[in-house]
Amino acid sequence: MLLCLFCVVFRQGDIWTSWYAVLSGSLDVKVSETANHQDAVTICTLGIDTALGESILDNTPRHTTIVSRETSELLRIEQREFKSLWEKYRQCMAGLLAPPYGAMETGSNNDNKDSLGSDPLNFMNNILNKVPSEKLQRGGKVMRNAILSRAPHMIRDRKYHLKTYRCLQCCVGTELVEWLVQQSTCVHTRSHAVGMWQVLLEEGVLNHVDQELGFQDKYLFYRFLDDEEEHTPLPSEEEKRESEEELPDTILFLTQMGPDALLRMILRKPPGQRTGDDLEIIYDELLHVKALSHLSNTVKRELASVLVFESHAKVGTVLFNQGEEGTSWYIIQKGSVNVVIYGKGVVCTLHEGDDFGKLALVTDSPRAASIVLREDNCHFLRVDKEDFNRILRDVEANTVRLKEHEQAVLVLEKSPRASSLGNIRYTVLSGTPEKILDHFLETMRMDTHHSDPNPAVDDFVLMHCVFMPNSQFCQLLMAHYHAVAPPGSEQERLEYAVTCKRRVLNLALRWAAVHTHHLQEEPAALIFLEELYGSVSNDSRILRALKDFVPDLEKVVKLHSEEAKVKKQKVLTQFSNGDEKLVKTQPIRNCDDILLKVYCSDHTYTTIRVAVAATGSEVTSAVANKLASNDDLLLVHLSSAGEKQMLKPNDVSVFSSLSINGRMFACPRDQLNALTPLPDQEGPSAGSMSSFELMSSKDLAYQMTLYDWELFSCVHEHELLYHTFGRQSFRRTTANLDLFLRRFNQVQLWVVTEVCLCGQLSKRVQLLKKFIKIAAHCREFKNLNSFFAIIMGMSNPAVSRLAQTWEKLPSKFKKFYAEFESMMDPSRNHRAYRLTVTKIEPPIIPFMPLLLKDMTFSHEGNKTFIDNMVNFEKMRVIANTIRAVRHCRSQPFNPEVCQPNKNHAEVRGYVRKLCVIDKQRTLTTFSYRLEPRRT
């Protein structure tokens, strides 16, 4: 309804007949002691998104007179219709009946924001427009029919607390969760199932009998939309059959939407009602939010307890205007917004993971810009000012800064959990390398000589190479070992010396265990170990408390010393499909050499022998010497597609950066444009299906897993660091990691190559079935790397577009593929994959590209140094990812899980020599030849 200036909406004493919400304009609220409108006094003004209608349910007279201050637009709902809505949404509509002169006198008060949106009006719009989407409505029908077909006892009349829900065909929350978990392996946990049912609840396809808005895994009653009416007919046999066929696809669809719905449901709860599991789910989500990557984990846990979900449906909605008081900090969970400044217009656009609104809270100043929705249906995580300031105060109160010469050298944060002895413990946030080492040595607890339960010590041992080279680390450790005791009694000085030495020995043993064979490549590390062993051997004669360390240290020193003396330098051939792949893979080390083919522009080549870690300049120098050339040569990686990548002089281990069919070229600059791929870079011209179609799918998956495990086992933990921070900084090779990643690409392209080179439709269908079976066995063997490589190969556009081939694939295999593909769903930071991994016990061959993505995200989103101090919080986050890799290898791979057939040697040779086409354009061309574009 539209009101003109000074129009009276209703008068004091009138009986309520409608509920109103302000869409635009503003209204004055007036009260008269005599009930005479002429002496009424204005007590407040109502703005946009406020509501009035406090007595609409009980027909009591109105307490105020409402007059428009300007031309205004109101939403009006008749009393009868409002009461009908009230019966369905009683709990969340209670706030809509507050008096206009109370809690709802301003539209910007965050307390008015309800659980389904950002304001009363938004909530009513959600209710009035709540029509389930066609797909979810069908999904609800499929789920209901499947339950009636498989477990009809679950939907029946119920009696609870003497109240009977007659003819309403209720289900119980716990039974629905239990049933769903049993239907598919895609449903990983009970909380995952709760999220899936929440999807249907939000759409109104499933309803709580008392209209509660959150699905709960409890003995609570729910009813499908089809059962809302009495005497709803049961599904026919035909409907049951159709639902059975559609059920796997419906469950897959809901599994993809479930995690988001579960998170929304948790965020809509008042903070005080969130359980420990709820907070863990929110915290896990915050770990992958870009805007929060620089915050400590303690702060993220604090945020998990106060974040509020807020959604807005329409593009153009203004969240706040420039100049307004800052009341909240926002993080974009879904959608995007424009940042608008008066006189300049849109100055930038913010997307998912970005944040805004923090500056006004930090500086306590007006908003510096307006924020406007750039698209429909945007979701936000909101932190209100009071919580924001409290968290800042708590962080500051729990932060300790140690200074030297007025400069901070160590920043600690009080741990929220005390130690078992009741002492306060501190977490290192940042510090100079020396002070961080000092802190861990001074606070290390020596319950046993083997380890301190504090995981931060492991973080330091694993990550110190980023900010403290081994030479410096060894020097500092030795200085701590020989530290002079402070003045005191003889007994006190003796106890101090023993404690210091035990802590150093503890840390040194853990350091040696992490670095393993890398120590043999550092003379300073070997000298340190020998000197430390000599010192401990002598000291243990007097200090009996050190005797326990002597055998362990002796083993370490002998192992590395003997290996260093008898160490044979391996000579590797270039990454190829040669016979060397049939030999059990051994780790590639910095000290190894490689025979590297380097091509000239006329396709002739020379073979040079260089160190594995050789730089680009060292390779070009070796080539120039071999060719007796005085030209200034460029080193170029030439792909099969003809793409040229200039290698820099300081690039380390250049050979391992070659793509599968890539080649290394060296040429003068004037010949650069003349470089063309070699004929053998094109890859095979015929498929190899005739070779492997008779091989057992299980044998193929087994031999692939054996080879992948060999490659994965060779990857040193530090190679992950070198890859993330740049191997040039360490002058170290990542060849083992590069080989493992290359294998993923090779398997993926193998799938695409075989399908695109198979000219017969029936054979292609058999190929798809074969690959799906191999993928299933790879998952059975916990080889997630090859499992994902195969599924991603089948998702390649050159394969996925083959509609005729996919149409012929039996529905059973289509369902398997759809289930496998759902595990690749990237939403919520690959939550489906992460949930899968948590349910698998080691040994596991993980999806390595995702782990590297996590490390890169942590690295690029956080500075390594803050105020000239090491950002140790960043080190801790990256170390957690590396520990996930360590967990995957914490148990040995058992080769007896599958008894190979007699032709295992043939299968082994085949899977280690996969020939592929790595040029996408060629694969796409072959694909169109198989099935031309439909007109």
Image: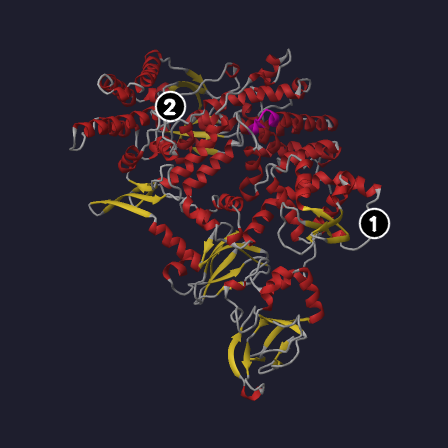
Between 284 and 171, the one nearer to me in the picture = 171
What residue is pinned by disc 2?
A: 513
Magenta region: which residues?
778-786
What residue is pinned by disc 1?
A: 233
Question: In the rendering, at what x and y percent does residue 190 appear?
Answer: 61, 40
856 above or below 470?
A: below
The answer to which image quadrant residue 722 occupies is top left
Q: Is residue 772 left or right of residue 244?
A: left
Question: In the rendering, at what x and y percent does residue 215 appear?
Answer: 63, 49
Between 124 and 793, the one nearer to me in the picture = 124
Viewer-side label of 2, 1: 1
Q: Earlier in the sequence, mark 2 or mark 1?
A: 1
Between 46 and 363, the one nearer to me in the picture = 46
- In space, the residues marked 2 and 1 are separated at their CA atoms by 68 Å
Query: Amino acid under label 1?
Result: Pro
Query: Amino acid under label 2?
Result: Ala
Question: In the rendering, at what x and y percent does residue 899 appear?
Answer: 62, 15
Task: Give the SS element for disc 2.
Answer: helix
The answer to which image quadrant residue 657 occupies is top left
